Image: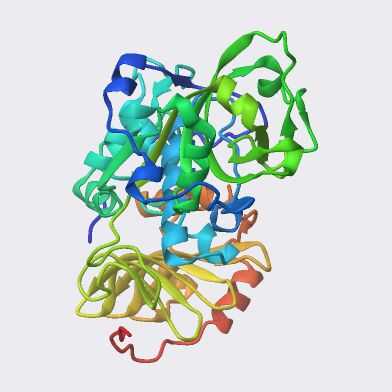
């Protein structure tokens, strides 16, 4: 499939704590409400003392000095984690290569006059994007920064639509808020939230041992979007476990604990999503999404390899990601089950990225790269590596180097592919 897009890259992330959510009380009050106690028939006293979905969360990253928290809380944190819960996916490397793109959602809700990404956005708008357009994996083109200038092509929109949600709900019943949040987590649903925060949160000065401790007289100093992924009745007298987007040096390795009382005091909005769990939806097994025959799907091989991408007649065909059992992976084009065309091979253990061109499973010699440097395909691969390096630090190996020659000699031609088998 030919992929055409225009992109301006600006991947400069730093540990500066920015925020970026706005609230619309009237619209929020008009949205459908999720009431887990009634819909799921929960009874008083049935809740466990603690629940955590941290093992299902994607890697903690930093949104940087930009106001993109709504994209991070909804697409990256909520959608990625909800999918992983339904597939039973806790493997770190597998989660790394299938994270949802925060900038896809942000791009469709941001103020285009805001060239520096400093203006806040509405979470209800983000939920509408997830329902009407979906989101895409970070490693699927186009590769975006917060202020990318681009045109979504049919490929990007088609891939995003595969990950669209069925619907979303709010949790705006303030009469029994804490139990409502806890029952929702018990129902295996993480929660995207919008909160008022004080300066001690934004600067990190009020975070001690992973817990946010605002002073009683602190004034509100903005608002921030995050994702609740657990609770613990005994930790700090009862607290919610919240996934943030300020990097791993913030709080509890990137997560933060907020007491029940502070959650009730500062919470403004809370949302859950319903993703596709029906035919071809998210599920456990070897075909964990799609039909693994002729749609964009995710397949887990008995060898431990995992493929997420396009299929045709049971063969890997089109754009996709193949993660091997040794945690090395290839992202790029496939044809009839073979790696075929331009792509990237990553060897995380060495911290190396290799630009590659395969011809039906055979890595071609360096002679094929003459005149490649600076071309559009080369720039696209550089864009992909920039995105990958946000999660997996590494360097690009020069195709003219001895190290690249050693890599080539280690890659053997692939065996003839066979279509995947579904249990």
Compared to 39, does 26 lie above or below?
A: above
- Toward the viewer: 193 or 76? 193
Q: Quadrant of the N terminus?
A: bottom left
Compared to 26, does 105 lie above or below?
A: below
Q: Residue at x 59, y 28 (%)?
A: 263
Q: Residue at x 46, y 37 (%)?
A: 192
Compared to 357, does 150 lie above or below?
A: above
Residue with the most extreme front position: 44
The colouring scheme, among rainbow, by chain, secondary structure or one colour, is: rainbow
Report whether 170 appears left or right of 384. Answer: left
Report whether 22 appears left or right of 29. Answer: right
Q: Position of residue 241 (x, y in %)?
A: 62, 42
- Toward the viewer: 407 or 169? 169
- Toward the viewer: 336 or 421? 421
Q: Position of residue 257 (x, y in %)?
A: 68, 37
Q: Position of residue 184 (x, y in %)?
A: 45, 45
Compared to 163, does 211 lie above or below?
A: above
Q: Residue at x 62, y 67 (%)?
A: 401
Q: Position of residue 290 (x, y in %)?
A: 27, 67
What count of labels does the image hold? 0
Q: Residue at x 34, y 91 (%)?
A: 416
- Toward the viewer: 335 or 171? 171
Residue 374 appears in view: no
Residue with the most extreme right position: 209
**Quarter of the view holding residue 395:** bottom right
Residue 356 appears in view: yes
Q: Quadrant of the C terminus?
A: bottom left
């Amino acid at each position: 499939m030919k992929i055409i897009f225009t992109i301006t890259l600006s991947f400069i992330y730093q540990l500066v704590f920015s925020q970026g959510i706005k609230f619309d009380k009237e619209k929020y009050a008009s949205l459908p409400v999720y009431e887990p106690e009634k819909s799921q028939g929960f009874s008083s006293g049935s809740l466990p003392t603690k629940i955590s979905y941290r093992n299902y969360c994607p890697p903690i990253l930093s949104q940087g000095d930009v106001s993109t928290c709504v994209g991070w809380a909804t697409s990256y944190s909520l959608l990625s984690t909800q999918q992983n819960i339904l597939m039973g996916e806790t493997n770190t490397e597998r989660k790394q290569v299938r994270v949802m793109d925060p900038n896809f959602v942000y791009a469709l809700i941001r103020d285009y006059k805001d060239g520096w990404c400093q203006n806040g956005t509405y979470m209800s708008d983000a939920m509408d994007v997830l329902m009407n357009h979906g989101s895409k994996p970070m490693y699927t083109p186009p590769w975006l920064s917060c202020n990318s200038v681009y045109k979504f092509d049919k490929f990007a929109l088609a891939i995003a639509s595969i990950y669209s949600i069925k619907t979303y709900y709010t949790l705006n019943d303030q009469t029994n808020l804490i139990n409502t949040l806890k029952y929702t987590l018990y129902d295996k649903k993480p929660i995207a939230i919008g909160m008022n925060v004080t300066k001690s949160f934004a600067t990190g000065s009020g975070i001690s041992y992973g817990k946010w401790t605002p002073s009683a007289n602190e004034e509100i100093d903005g608002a921030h979007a995050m994702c609740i992924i657990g609770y613990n009745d005994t930790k700090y007298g009862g607290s919610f476990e919240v996934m943030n987007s300020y990097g791993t040096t913030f709080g509890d390795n990137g997560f933060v604990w907020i007491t029940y009382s502070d959650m009730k005091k500062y919470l403004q909005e809370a949302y859950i999503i319903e993703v596709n769990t029906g035919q071809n939806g998210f599920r456990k097994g070897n075909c964990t999404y799609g039909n693994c025959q002729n749609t964009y799907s995710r397949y887990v091989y008995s060898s431990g390899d995992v493929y997420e991408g396009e299929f045709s007649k049971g063969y890997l065909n089109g754009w996709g990601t193949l993660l091997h059992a040794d945690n090395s992976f290839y992202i790029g084009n496939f044809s009839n089950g073979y790696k075929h065309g331009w792509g990237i091979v990553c060897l995380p253990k060495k911290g190396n990225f290799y630009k590659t061109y395969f011809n039906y499973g055979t890595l071609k010699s360096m002679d094929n790269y003459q005149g490649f440097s600076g071309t559009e395909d080369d720039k696209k691969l550089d864009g992909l590596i920039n995105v990958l390096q946000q999660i997996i630090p590494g360097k690009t190996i020069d195709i003219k180097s001895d190290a690249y020659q050693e890599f080539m000699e280690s890659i053997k031609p692939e065996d003839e592919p066979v279509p995947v088998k579904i249990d």
